[in-house]
Amino acid sequence: MAVYNLATIDVAKVIMFVTDSSLNQTNKPLKKRFVILISGIGSNMQRIAQLANDSRSLVSIQAVVSNKPSATGLDWAAQRGIETAVVDHQLFSGREAFDQALAEVVAKFEPDYVLLAGFMRILTPGFVNQFKGRLINVHPSLLPAFPGLHTHARALKAGVDRHGCSVHFVTDELDHGPVIAQAALEVSTTETPEQLAQRVLVLEHQLYPEVVQWLSRDKVTLDDNGRVTLHGVSYRHIGTQE
């Protein structure tokens, strides 16, 4: 695992690349390159990595990057041969400096898409714009409802009968980017926020890998007006689950 303090280290000299030989095989579609950002366990990252292991998959995970050296998802990824890196946000004087360093590390892996999977940092416009149209997040609510934190407690307090998760493009406005797909479930009036969170997480583990698969096969496009179009996909909502 590489650990970077880009204030003092030339990343061009320390980044190691992972070569996927299947990208160069003739008569086969090229795999899409993904970098996944995490801050903890990275349970969604793990589901996406499992998808990538399928011989039919066009998903190639180039790296898992975290802002926390203690993120347990890094060990999980490294044990499976996935390149990992740390850009510790505590080593930088502010958000802009950290995001610039993070962007340099991510860019070295030449990703087609950057996936946020439990990455607990609000990204600056500079980072978002560098990866505009290629930066994807999963959010635990049916956006535009309940952006930000504590979504499950807020959903229960509001008395909604349906709740869920959204996979969306990331823009400068927090949790307001164009939605690619959503998954929903029915809310019980007797459940706790923690119980609801666990149920929604199950939906995330279903929805996020599905969207990543679409991305890898060029089934998702985003136009200049922020409109998402799905190609060859008959649905963009997983129905209500009890």
Image (cartoon, grey):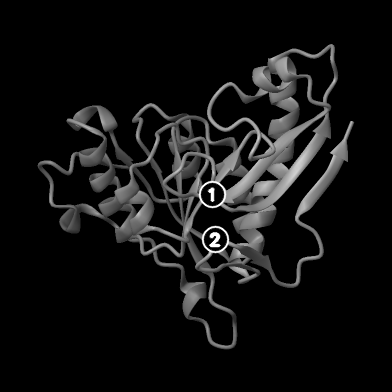
Per the image, label 2 sits on a secondary structure element best described as loop
Q: Is residue 4 visible?
A: no
| Front-most of residues 61 and 7 | 7
Can you say whether 205 is above or below 24 in the image?
above
Can you say whether 210 is above or below 159 in the image?
below
Query: Mark on residue 46?
Result: none
**Quarter placement of the C terminus:** top right
Single out the residue that lies furthest toward the front: 225
Image location (x, y in percent) of residue 64: 43, 46
Q: Residue at x 25, y 27 (%)?
A: 90
Residue 195 appears left or right of 72: right
**Type of the residue with mark 2:** Gly
| Front-most of residues 207 and 147 | 147
| Front-most of residues 121 and 87 | 121
- Could you tell me if the residues under marks 1 and 2 are in contact, i.e. CB atoms within 8 Å? yes
Image location (x, y in percent) of residue 207: 70, 47
Q: Which residue is mark 1?
A: 177
Q: Quadrant of residue 199?
A: top right
Q: Residue at x 54, y 25 (%)?
A: 149
Q: Quadrant of residue 211?
A: bottom right
Image location (x, y in percent) of residue 21: 47, 73
Residue 69 appears left or right of 80: left
**Type of the residue with mark 1:** Gly
Disc 1 from disc 2: Cα separation: 8 Å
Residue 218 appears left or right of 102: right
Q: Which residue is mark 2?
A: 226
Residue 191 appears left or right of 82: right
Q: Residue at x 36, y 56 (%)?
A: 129
